[in-house]
Image: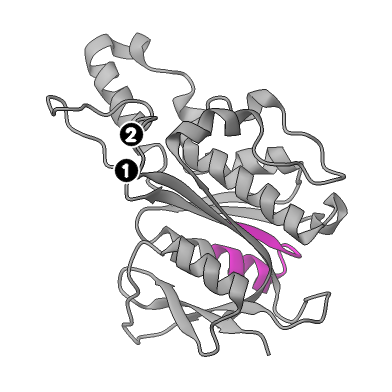
């Protein structure tokens, strides 16, 4: 069983029309932190942009200095990163060949792109890793993050969960509206969501106050949580400390890996 305490958190939600401005300034930079270069997020996936903003928002709420995260790692568990952009790129490749394909696809739409970009934005020197990629990305993200804590690889870890709500599904060639390299700016329903969790070893809270923890179990219970994780509900529970009995928030497809939200004792 692996356990980690939630030292801080923030949920960032952005409509497609808000992304361009967010690329230039992903939220207020907390005191003591260097300003993120404007060019860093210029070609980044929307989930990366929202993930960066969520971490800065969490740091601002914690009132922490860069020294507080010395040696920390970053695990980014994204869901279908760059799905629409890659679909459009493949269609362009089929029509125009390699000259119709952007060189930014590899550095900005790979699984490790969000964690690497957030690491650069924060100036952290700890390990960073992208995991998951599909519906059950959250359980894989918790598994990686809590394993690092349990093994003493890092003193703390940022776990960033992200995805679109509702899910952004590319259209097929010939459909009424083909997918583009970005969601429609006037879409009033869809939004990108990113939840940043600052995780520390259980019992390592410095303020002495009661908080929330996450616990990971591997067994044969075959309990399956809905996927993907409802990031808005999870953020509300973490902020309000409303969970008094363990609640399963994420599992792997088979239900053998179970992540539970619990109140710290």
- Residue 235 within the segment the image draws in magenta: no
- Find residue 234 and report its horizontal and vertical position in percent: 50, 68
Q: Name the residue under label 2.
A: 84
Q: How crowded is mark 2: few (under 14 residues within 10 Å), some or many (20 or more)?
A: some
- The quadrant holding residue 35 is top right
Q: Does the magenta stretch include residue 156?
A: yes
| Image quarter of residue 199 | bottom right
Q: Which residue is drawn at 35% across and 86% down?
A: 220
Q: Is residue 260 above or below residue 162?
A: below
Q: How crowded is mark 1: few (under 14 residues within 10 Å), some or many (20 or more)?
A: some
The x, y position of residue 167, in whole percent, is 32, 49
Q: Is residue 156 visible?
A: yes
Q: Which residue is disc 1 drawn over? A: 168
- Could you tell which of marks 2 and 1 lies nearer the N-terminus? 2
| Nearer-the-camera pick, 118 or 256 | 118
Q: Where is residue 159 in the image (x, y as percent from the top left)?
A: 59, 58
Q: Residue 233 carries which label?
A: none
Q: Which of marks 2 and 1 is in front?
A: 1
Q: Position of residue 64 (x, y in %)?
A: 82, 57
Which residue is at a point 32% across and 77% down the rendered structure image? 224
Q: Quadrant of the N terminus?
A: bottom right
Q: Distance between the residues labelled 2 and 1?
A: 7 Å
Magenta-drawn segment: 144-159
């Amino acid at each position: 069983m692996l356990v980690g305490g939630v030292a801080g958190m923030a949920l960032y939600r952005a409509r497609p029309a808000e992304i361009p401005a967010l690329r230039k300034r992903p939220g207020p930079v907390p005191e003591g932190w260097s300003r993120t270069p404007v060019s860093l997020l210029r070609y980044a996936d929307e989930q990366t942009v929202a993930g960066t903003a969520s971490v800065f928002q969490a740091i601002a709420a914690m009132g922490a200095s860069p020294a507080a995260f010395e040696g920390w790692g970053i695990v980014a568990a994204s869901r279908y990163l760059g799905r629409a952009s890659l679909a459009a790129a493949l269609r362009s490749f089929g029509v125009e060949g390699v000259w119709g394909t952007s060189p930014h696809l590899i550095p900005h739409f790979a699984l490790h792109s969000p964690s690497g970009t957030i690491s650069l934005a924060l100036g952290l020197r700890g390990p960073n890793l992208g995991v998951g990629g599909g519906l059950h990305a959250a359980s894989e993200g918790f598994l990686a993050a809590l394993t690092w804590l349990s093994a003493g690889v890092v003193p703390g870890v940022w776990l960033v969960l992200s995805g679109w709500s509702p899910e952004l599904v590319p259209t097929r060639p010939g459909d009424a509206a083909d997918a583009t390299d970005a969601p429609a700016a006037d879409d009033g329903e869809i939004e990108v969501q990113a939840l940043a969790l600052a995780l520390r070893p259980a019992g390592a809270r410095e303020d002495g106050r009661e908080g929330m923890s996450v616990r990971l179990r591997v067994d044969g219970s075959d309990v399956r949580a809905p996927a993907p994780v409802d990031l808005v509900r999870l953020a509300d529970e973490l902020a309000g400390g409303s969970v008094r009995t363990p609640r399963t928030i994420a599992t792997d497809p088979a239900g053998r890996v179970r992540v539970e939200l619990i109140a710290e004792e």
